Structures are given as C-alpha cells and as structure tokens.
Amino acid sequence: MGLGSLEIYRNRLDEAASTVLGASDIAKKIGWEQGVGIALLRLGSIRRRQGSYSEGEEFLRESTSVFRHCKVRWRLAQGLYGLGVCLHAQGRLDEAAAALEESCSLYLEISVDDWEFPPTARALAKVKKDLGRASESLRWYDAAIAEHHRLQLEDKNGLSVCLADKARILNELKQYDEAALHFEASLVLSQELGDDQGVKRDQLLLQGMPKTAISWESRNFAKPRPISALQASHLLCDVKKLQRRIPQLRTSCLKLEIGVTES
C-alpha cells in the first residue's frame, strides 16, 4: 500500500493503480477490512486526479462505507473529502456540500494537526460559492486561512490560492478594501514562492478593482494606531506587517479606513 502511495506522489498514476489493486487483493485474502478501505481510497484518489470523477466517486463511496463500519474517522474524513471533490466536479453541489461538511466536522472533532483540514475547508468554500452562499463560503475560507496560520503550514501556494479566492468573493460583494488586502497578501506569497503565474493573476485582479477619488494625502491620520490596539486578523495573521503598510499598497486609493476584525 505504501508503494502505491509513493507512485501517486510521483504522479505515476497508472503504476499506482496497478500496485494498489494488487494490495487490495492481498487485503481481501487476509481479511484486512481497513486495508481494503485504504485501497479503495487510493484508487478513488487516482481516478479523481485522472479526471475520471464518476469512477472515482464509486471507489470513494465504497471506501467511506468500509471506514464507517470500521469506525476509522480519520480515513472516513479523507474519503469524504475526495468524494465531495468528485461530486463537485460533476455539478452535484448539494451532495458535494454534504460530503465536505461531514469531512470538515470529522477533522475538527478528531483535531488532526496536519495539512488535511485546510484544503477540505477550501473545497467546501468553493462549493458554497457555487451554491450562491457567499457568506458561508467566506466563513470556510476564514477557517482554512486560520488553520494555515495555527499550524504554521508550509503550503504557501495553498494559502495564496485561498486568499485570492476569498478576495474574489469580497470583490463581488463590493467589499473592496478587504478584497484588496487579501489580493495583496496573496501577491506577497506568490512573490515569495517565485510563482510568476500567481503574481500576474493577483496583479491583474488588483488592477481590475474599482478605485475612488479619495487619496491617502486627503486622509487625516495623526499617527499610526498602535499595534496593541488592533484585533487579530485571519488574513495573513501578521497584522504588524499589514496594518500600517496599507498606504503602500498597490491599490492606494481604497475608499475607507480598514478595520481589522475577526471573521
């Protein structure tokens, strides 16, 4: 089973599928039910990566049934995540939301301190957006961003994408000030990663945002507010760098002073 996971990591998906199928046969022969579930989970993940969402859904549904029976909540959460992504890709939004919500709930219950909750929350946020539930979508993006910070994850690309996706929703809701800060934060991360495509994406999004006639020169700032007076932010959770850096943003004509609040 471990060799199959290694082949998936190497993106050698056909080889991975062959290896996992062999491991699945062995697990069935020795009566290792959880091993069968893991094999189904791996096969579902492979088919999902290959774009075969319907076939991936079948494997993942079977895996979740096995994990429910075995009462293995962590593996069940993994299976539900993959299932939700497959359902979303097929346009079955309500089913996708239900699977991803259960997956997120399981991760929160078992408190697994690793990288798996943020992408699951981000996937759920995307589904909520497609369902037209912007406020719910924003809450799940906030949860993903906050968890990235809490665990100090090294997945800066995932965080950058999350910030940019949340910024798009804020922009659509005409919350331009907060949207600009999220785009800016995403841009900074893209620059740190050397992600030229991400930098261009964020620059174009920033340039396309509405501007106002109010300039920073017309603002009556006596002096910057002390950092101690600010509330914690889920943005990049580095308020010291962000808050008084606002006048230096590429979107320097923001319409209002930005209050940093908990989401």
Image (tube, helix red, strand yellow):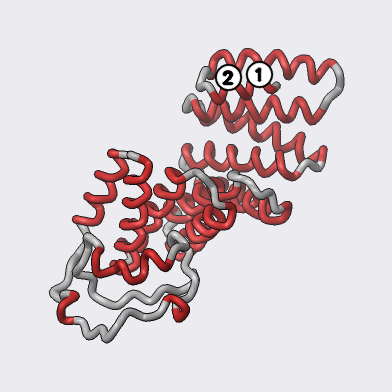
In the rendered structure, find residue 7 and report the number of the disc placed on it.
Answer: 2
| Amino acid at circle 1 | Leu
| Element carrying mark 1 | helix
Residue found 45% across the figure and 46% down from its top = 156
Q: Are marks 1 and 2 in contact (CB under 8 Å)?
A: yes
Q: Position of residue 229 (x, y in %)?
A: 45, 81
Q: Position of residue 15 (x, y in %)?
A: 57, 13
Residue found 56% across the figure and 55% down from its top = 147
Question: Which of 178/246 is in front?
Answer: 246
According to the picture, the residue beneath numbered tag 1 turns out to be 3
Residue found 86% across the figure and 22% down from its top = 31
How many numbered dots are placed on residues in this image?
2
Farthest left residue?
213
Q: Position of residue 260 (x, y in %)?
A: 41, 73
* Distance from Cα at disc 1 to Cα at disc 2: 6 Å
Question: Which of 196/138 is in front?
Answer: 196
Q: Identify the image quadrant of the N terminus.
A: top right
Residue 74 position (above or below residue 164): above
Locate residue 126 relative to residue 30 in the image: left or right: left
Can I make out residue 179 in this image?
yes
Q: Quadrant of the rendered structure where residue 74 is?
A: top right
Residue 82 position (above or below residue 244): above
Locate residue 94 relative to residue 43 in the image: left or right: left
Locate residue 236 relative to residue 4 in the image: left or right: left
Question: Which of 142/87 is in front?
Answer: 142
| Amino acid at circle 2 | Glu
Density class for disc 2 (Cα within 10 Å; few <14, some 14-19, many ≥20) is: some
Residue found 73% across the figure and 52% down from its top = 110
Q: Quadrant of the rendered structure where residue 68 is?
A: top right
